[in-house]
């Protein structure tokens, strides 16, 4: 077990390249089982959730080879076998394998998936959608067993534009008989990335990025090469770290149009934002103003950036509100930020944040991935030393996080947890 130690109150300056998207990679790593030929994926982040997903694929008979950020995956010899339940339970996207495995092998059995503890996270849309595609699904003793000789096309309406259900059902329909329509589909960039990947393999997916997706079934897919698009959440996190420290950070190699909601709110708060063809520069301002935020499905303000944004708003002038509408308990950052001197009051799912002059470093604990990112941002802006515990949550989704922040001038390092007792505190 290790900890992150930060000496705060240093402005971050500089330019960094953004790595491949964790959430796009995880969705694509379900789609790979549809192909009988090897697939080469570039810019695959080497984060813990991706490592778990590739281990899961190996359990199912895939041959996986990593060289740098390139993964070669050969699913030609996939086996109808139960993967290690602990791996399945460790991540949410393990469940997105159910439909594609069924499409390839005729049946599949997986336990209820896991993921960050930020709300109930049911899989009812996934199960209902697969049934509409002709699957027989039984749930018993914590396991879903699914069977279909060949999935058939269906018309699916999602009660909520779930990113995961859209990705899962879209991939499941690729080898189905006929034309499937998914209505009220999620429009997240990671859905578009998966559709692009599936089409590269020979699928016929249209409309990804809009609320209606059409999938015309094909009988087989071929191997392909595909580069994972950049991680908009990593980009957003780094920009927020720059703004929180009153610094000047540029993220490169990204699609700025995917950051619309974040950039609007940063500008509204008084940060200076410049945008180029594939880069964004954000500069902080000691007189940041309070803003109101409400998380929404894309293109609304991302739930994944609400905790990092809340960390920035702790020191904005006035009273900010951050309302979480996607998950019922994505609030693990609140008590910890308050331990650092923030003034955050919870009203239902809304954080009411009264800006303070500065945060003060202390020992805090990450409860989930984005709460961890929020605490690191808070630590970078706070006076004195911050120790973040439970950094395994951060490792789920940020590759080389400390190195990247160090490149920007942060004083941040990973230390063994037994050094906590000897760590020195400033008052
Ligand atoms: N939902 C249901 N039933 C379902 C599926 C979803 O009620 O069958 C609900 C969820 O409980 C939630 C809402 O729908 O309240 C949205 O969930 P969604 O399915 O969109 O989320 P997800 O696919 O499980 C992905 C990302 C999350 C991100 C959300 C929203 C991955 C691996 N995870 O989760 O990312 O917050 O979309 O954009 O792609 C993160 O990266 O930190 C993270 C949690």
Image (cartoon, rainbow, N blue to C red):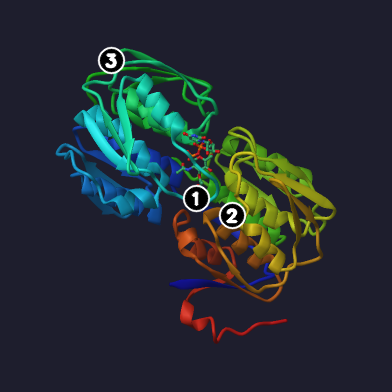
User: Residue 371: image x %, image y %?
Assistant: 58, 57
Is residue 255 toward the left or the right of residue 115 in the image?
right
User: Residue 222: image x %, image y %?
Assistant: 23, 28
- Label 1 or label 3, whichever lies nearer to me, is 3
At 26% from the left edge and 34% from the top edge, which residue is drawn?
A: 101
At 59% from the left edge and 63% from the top edge, which residue is drawn?
A: 376
- Total count of labels: 3
Mark 1 → mark 3, Cα distance in angstroms: 39 Å
- Circles 1 and 3, Cβ within 8 Å, touching? The answer is no
Residue for badge 3: 177
Quadrant location, the N terminus:
bottom left
Q: SS at mark 2?
A: helix
Residue for badge 2: 238
At 39% from the left edge and 39% from the top edge, which residue is drawn?
A: 27
Residue 250 in sight in this render = no
Q: SS at mark 1?
A: loop
2 or 3: tag closer to the N-terminus: 3
Q: Is residue 70 above or below residue 389?
A: above
Mark 2 → mark 3, Cα distance in angstroms: 44 Å
1 or 3: tag closer to the N-terminus: 1
User: Residue 61: image x %, image y %?
Assistant: 18, 44
- Circles 2 and 1, Cβ within 8 Å, touching? The answer is yes
Q: Nearer the viewer, residue 39 or 165?
A: 165
CA neighbours of label 3 inside 10 A, class few (<14), some (14 to 19), many (20+): some
Q: Residue furthest right?
A: 318
Residue for badge 1: 18
* Quadrant housing residue 9: bottom right
Q: SS at mark 3?
A: loop
Q: Residue furthest bottom?
A: 422
């Amino acid at each position: 077990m290790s900890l992150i130690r930060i000496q705060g109150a240093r402005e971050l300056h500089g330019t960094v390249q953004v790595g491949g998207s964790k959430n796009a990679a995880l969705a694509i790593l379900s789609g790979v089982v549809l192909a009988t030929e090897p697939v080469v994926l570039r810019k695959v982040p080497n984060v813990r959730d991706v490592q778990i997903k590739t281990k899961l694929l190996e359990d199912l008979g895939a041959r996986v080879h990593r060289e740098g950020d390139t993964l070669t995956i050969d699913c030609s010899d996939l086996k109808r076998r139960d993967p290690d339940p602990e791996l399945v339970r460790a991540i949410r996207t393990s469940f997105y394998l159910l439909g594609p495995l069924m499409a390839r092998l005729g049946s599949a059995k997986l336990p209820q998936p896991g993921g960050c503890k930020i709300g109930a996270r049911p899989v009812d849309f996934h199960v209902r959608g697969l049934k509409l595609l002709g699957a027989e699904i039984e749930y018993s003793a914590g396991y879903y067993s699914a069977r279909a000789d060949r999935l058939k096309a269906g018309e699916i309406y999602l009660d909520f534009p779930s990113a995961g259900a859209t990705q899962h059902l879209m991939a499941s329909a690729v080898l189905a008989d006929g034309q499937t329509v998914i209505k009220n589909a999620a429009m997240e960039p990671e859905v578009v990335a998966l559709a692009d990947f599936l089409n590269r393999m020979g699928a016929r997916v249209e409309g990804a990025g809009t609320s209606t997706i059409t999938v015309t079934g094909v009988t087989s897919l071929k191997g392909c090469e595909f580069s994972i698009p950049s991680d908009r959440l990593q980009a957003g996190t780094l920009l927020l770290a720059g703004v929180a420290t009153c610094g000047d950070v540029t993220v490169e190699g990204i699609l700025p149009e995917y950051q619309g909601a974040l950039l609007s709110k940063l500008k509204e708060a008084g940060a200076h934002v410049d945008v180029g063809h594939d880069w964004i520069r954000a500069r902080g301002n000691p007189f940041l103003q309070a803003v109101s935020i409400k998380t929404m499905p894309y293109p609304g303000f991302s739930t994944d950036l609400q905790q990092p944004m809340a960390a920035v708003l702790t020191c904005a002038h006035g009273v900010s509100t951050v309302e979480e509408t996607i998950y019922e308990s994505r609030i693990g950052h609140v008590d910890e930020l308050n331990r650092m001197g923030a003034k955050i009051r919870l009203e239902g799912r809304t954080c009411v944040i009264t800006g303070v002059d500065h945060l003060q470093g202390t020992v805090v604990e990450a409860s989930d991935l984005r709460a961890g990112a929020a605490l690191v941002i808070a630590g970078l802006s706070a006076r004195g030393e911050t120790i973040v515990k439970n950094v395994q949550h951060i490792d789920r989704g940020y590759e080389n996080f400390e190195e990247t922040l160090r490149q920007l001038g942060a004083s941040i390092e990973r230390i063994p947890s037994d050094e906590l007792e000897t760590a020195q505190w400033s008052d």
